[in-house]
Image (tube, helix red, strand yellow):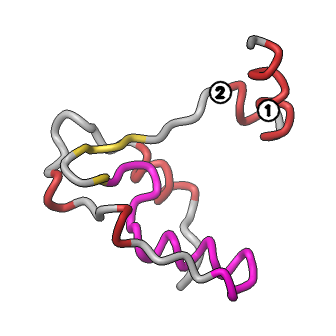
Amino acid sequence: MKSLTLAELDTLSAVDIKTVDPEQLVDIRDISIHTELPREERVLDFIRQIRNPYCFRHGKIVVKIGFSEAAKETTMEEQFESYLRTL
């Protein structure tokens, strides 16, 4: 599978949770993570299976994932550290 372009990722992230047909979304419980694959291939395989990593189902629940603008400028570790400071 080829990597998705930024334009394709933007399109996937723009799916409206209020209007999307839940039956068209993949149920994340049906996804198999192949831990024997190298990290990059594992990510690509996950995206191939889930089809839209920003919007999917868990049973009858539609899940929408998003990231803040601040997250684009900091690492996950920095974001997690910031979160821990709020506890």
Element carrying mark 1: loop
Tell me the crowding category of disc 1: few under 14, some 14 to 19, or many 20 or more residues within 10 angstroms, Cα based. Answer: few
2 and 1 marks in contact (CB < 8 Å): yes
**Residue in view at x 82 percent, y 33 percent:** 74
Q: Amino acid at mark 1?
A: Glu
Magenta residue span: 35-56
- What residue is disc 2 on? 69
Where residue 27 appears, as percent x and y from the top left, is: 30, 62
Which quadrant would the C terminus be assigned to in this image?
A: top right
**Residue in view at x 50 percent, y 55 percent:** 9
Q: Amino acid at mark 2?
A: Glu
**Residue in view at x 38 percent, y 67 percent:** 51
Element carrying mark 2: helix
- What residue is disc 1 on? 73
- All told, the count of numbered labels is 2
- The numbered dot on residue 29 is none
Front position in the image: 57 or 18: 57
Front position in the image: 32 or 76: 32
Q: Image quarter for residue 34?
A: bottom right
